[in-house]
Image (cartoon, helix red, strand yellow):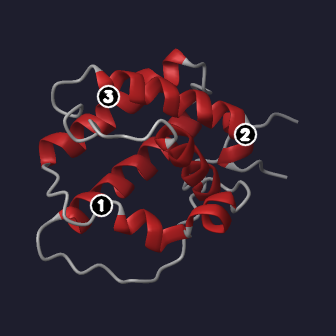
Amino acid sequence: MTPTLYEWAGGAEALDRLTRAFYRRVHDDPILSPVFAGMSPDHPHHVALWLGEVFGGPPIYTEEHGGYPHMMSKHLGLALTEEQRARWVALITPAADDVGLPADPEFRSALLAYVEWGTRIALANSQPGAQPPPQAPVPHWGWGEAPPYEPG
């Protein structure tokens, strides 16, 4: 049976490591640090819970934080720029390297595909006057066209 992206990544602990490493990079980044200047110390963990659910892990983000409506509400009115969105994408790969997430092309392709998609949704939802749907399911991201190669 093909593992989920959550399982392949290493589960909750691996995603917590990823988001902590990522937000350390954000803290030092001149383009993104202003966006996250008032970030709660729990923010990296909340993002790890979101990613865990998206990648096939338990629905903890939905159960404890309100799922899609809560995530969407965090982006309303931020007026994010394309430069900020692109920097978010650019910082995730070195953070994944920092913490030893799987480096196989299949996993990294799926991770970056979600990050590209998700940051574009966040960018659109953050613009003045944006009216995203108030309810939607948490996306469930998979391997796409290239599942992992498992010999045998």
Q: Earlier in the sequence, mark 3 or mark 2?
A: 2
Give 53 or 75, whichever is nearer the viewer: 75
Where does label 2 land, which residue? Answer: 11
Q: Position of residue 9 (x, y in %)?
A: 66, 36
Identify the residue at horizontal 35%, vertical 83% (top origin): 133
Residue type at mark 1 is His
Residue type highlighted by circle 3: Val
Spatial CA distance of label 1 from label 3 is 17 Å
Residue 75 got which mark?
1
Residue type, mark 2 in image: Gly
Say the numbered circle drawn on residue 26.
3
**The C terminus appears in which quarter of the rendering?**
top right
- The picture quadrant where one finds residue 121 is bottom left
Q: Helix, strand or loop at disc 3?
A: helix
Q: Residues within 10 Å of mark 3 (few under 14, many from 20)?
A: many
Image location of residue 132, percent across then percent down:
29, 78
Point out the tag, 1 or 3, that comes first from the N-terminus. 3
Residue 57 image position (x, y, % from top left): 71, 54
